[in-house]
Image (cartoon, rainbow, N blue to C red):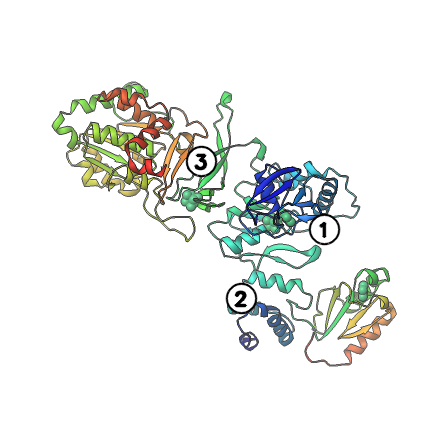
Amino acid sequence: MVKIHIDKKPIDVEEGTTVLKAAETAGISIPHLCYHDAFPPEGSCRMCLVEIEGLPKLELACSTQVRDGMKVFTKSEKVVEARKGVLEFLLAEHPLDCPICDKAGDCKLQDYYDEYGLFESQFRESKEKREKKDKIGKSLIHDEERCILCRRCVRFLREITETQELGVFERGIHSRVNIYDLTPVDNNYSGNLAQICPVGAITDEDFRFKTRSWFLKKGESICPLCSRGCSITIEYHPGFSHFGVPSRVYRIQSRENQEVNGFWICDMGRYGYSYLSENRLDKIVINNKEWNIQPTWEDVSYFINQQLKKLDEGKKTSQTVLILNTWLSNEELFLIHKIFKNDQNLERIFFADRPQAEKDDFLLTAERTPNKKGALEMGFDMKPANPGALSDKTDLLLAFGSFLAEQISAADLKKALEKIETKVLFTSHENELNSLFDIVLPTALIPEKGGSLTNIDGKIQKFSPVFEPPGDSLPEWMMLADLGRKFGINSSFYGEFKTPETIAKEIENEVPFFREQK
Amino acid sequence: MEKSVDELEKDQRELIHVLHDVQEEFGYIPAQAISQISKQLKISESEIFGVLTFYKAFSLKPRGEHLITICVGTACHVRGAPMILDEFERKLGIKAGETSEDNQFTLETVNCVGACALGPIAIADGEYHGQLKTRKVDKIIDKLMSTKRNGSD
Ligand code: SF4
Ligand code: SF4
Ligand code: FES
Ligand code: FES
C-alpha cells in the first residue's frame, strides 16, 4: 500500500496502480479516450494528462504508476489548459457531425469537449475529406473522419478475438484504421467494436439512424441465449402507453462482469433481441369450445385446481405430466418442485429445451440452457420430453415454454397431445404449438420479471424487471405461487412469496447448493 | 519471392528487413508476399500492411524504370516545390503517386529529405537536383530516358 494525494485528497492504494485507477477509487474521474480497462495502457490520446508535484512536465494518468507520497493534481490550471489543447488537436480533423452521428449522447469526445473544451476553433484550414461509410464487417460501418486513432478496436481484435482484421495504415494525417484486402471483420464478437469505440467512428448498422441514445432507457439484465449468462444492458424506448405504443428494445450492450463475461458479449446475444418483442402472446388463448368466456388468470388457476382435484389420488401422480424448461428461474423451478413434486407427488416431469448448437472458444456455450445447473441443483433429473412419455395415459398436461416444438416434430406432437384430455401451456410467444393446447397463458420473459439463473459454472445471477411484460402476461413465479396457495396443501407457506427475493430466501433455507453459493 | 521470405528466420523483428528484401527484388510489395510473410512470421496481414504503408520506402504498386521523388516538405514547399511537381506531372502525364503507362516513370512525393537549404529538391534515380527551376525539368527527364537502370529503389 502506498499513500498518495489526488487533488489534496489522501488515498491509500495498492502499489503498481496507475494514477487513473487510483483516482477512480477516490471518485475522481480523469478524462481518457485510448485507455480501456480491458487492455494495458497505450498512452496515445493524451487526454489523461495530470500534474504531479515535482515533475516538470504533465504526465499520463493512464500509464503512470503511483509512488508513495505522490501529489497529483487533476484540475490545476496547467492541466485544464493542456486538456483544452489536446481536445483542440483531436477536433482539428474531426467532422463535428454530431447531429447525424449515432454516438452522440454516448460519445466521450463530445462529453469531454462539453466539460473541458468549449473553445472557439482557431483552424481556418478546411478539414481533410475521408471515407465516411466504409463497411468493415457484418454490421459495422467505419467513418475515417470521426476516428481519433485510439486503436481500441485494433487492440480488441488483436488481444481478445485474436482475429486481427483491423490495422492502422499509413501515417501522419493520412493514418487510418481499416481492414486489409477487403477481408471484413468477421467473428462472433464484432459488435463489441461499436461499443468500445469511444467516438462514432465505428457504428452498428443494426442501430444506425434508428433513434437517439438520449431517448433510450437502460436496464440491467442477463442474456438467456446460452448457458453462459452474460451480463447485459438492455436499451429500450419505454413507448407511449397513452397512445398504445408499446416499449421497444433498440439494442443490447455488454455490461462488465469479471466473473462471467469480462467486458464483452457475443454477437448472438447482442443482435438476437427480436424475440423480446416479435410474436409475443399478450392474452390468454382458449382453444376449447367448452369455454365461452375470455377467462382471467383467476379463472384458469381455479380450473387447473379443479382438474387436479378431479383425478383421484392414486391416478394423479401417474396421469399428470409436467413439461419444464431451463428458461425458468431458480425461483420458479423451486416453486414447481415444491408444489408438484413435494405436495402433489407428481412423477412424470420432463424438460424440453433448445437443442445444443455451435459453440466458440470464448463465451458462447454449446448448451442453450440458461438455468440447467439451477434445475439440476433443485433436484430435477431433467428427463427429456418425448412423444411416448407425453401421451401414455395422461389426463392433464401442464407445459412451460414452446421448446417442445424444437424437440418433437409437429405431426408427432399433434398425435401425442390429441389423446390428452386437458392441456395447459404457459408460454411467451405465439407458436403453432399453441393451437394444440386447450388454454394458453402468456408469460413474462427474463427482462420482464425478477429472479435468478444459475449459469454453466454454477454462478447464481440475479436479475430484476427492466420493463413490463406485454398485455396480460404474468411472470411464472407469480402464477406458481398463486397455484400453490390455491391447491391448499400448504397455503400459508406459498402466501409468503410476494416477491422473487422472498422465494430466493426460502431456496437458501432448503437447498444446500444455493446456501453455499452465498 | 519464395526465397527472400524463406531465407529469413521466423523472427518477427525481421519484418522490416523482409519487406526491404522483397521491395528490392520486385520493386514493390506484391499482395502474395504479404500473405506469405504473414504466415511465415506469424504477423497478421493487417499489421504488415500497417508497417509497409507507414514507410515511404515500400510501394504497393510496381514502380517504373525510373523513380522521380519530389520533396514537398515545408522548406521546399515555400521555395516553390508545388510548381516543380506540377511541371513533372504535366511533362510525364501522370499524377504524384502514379506510374506512366509505358512503365518508364514513377512520380512520388516525400516530406523533407534533410537538405532544406538546397530546396526545392527532386531526386531522380538517386541523384539529387537542388535549387530546381521548372525549366530544368525537361533536362532531368531527358537524362533519365537516355540511361538504363537495373532495379529500382
Ligand atoms: S475506430 Fe474508434 S476505436 Fe478504432 S481507432 Fe478509431 S476511434 Fe479508436
Ligand atoms: S455468450 Fe451466451 S450468454 Fe453471452 S451474450 Fe452470447 S449467447 Fe448470451
Ligand atoms: S488515456 Fe492516457 S493517453 Fe489516452
Ligand atoms: S523540405 Fe525539402 S529537403 Fe527539407
Q: Position of residue B14 (x, y in %)?
A: 59, 70
Amino acid type shown at disc 1: Glu
What is the quadrant of residue B30 in the picture? bottom right
Quadrant of the rendering where the C terminus of chain B is positioned: bottom right
Q: Which residue is mark 3?
A: A221
Quadrant of the rendering where the N terminus of chain B is positioned: bottom right
Mark 3–mark 2 contact, CB under 8 Å? no
Give the chain letter at badge 1: A
**Residue A405 has which mark?**
none
Mark 3 CB within 8 Å of ligand 2 = no
Q: Are marks 3 and 2 on the same chain?
A: no
Q: Earlier in the sequence, mark 1 or mark 3?
A: 1
Q: Secondary structure at mark 1?
A: loop
Q: Which residue is mark 1?
A: A128
Q: Which residue is mark 2?
A: B38
- Mark 3–mark 2 distance (CA, rounded to whole Å): 41 Å
Q: Nearer the viewer, residue A381 or A179?
A: A381
Q: Is residue A11 left or right of residue A439?
A: right
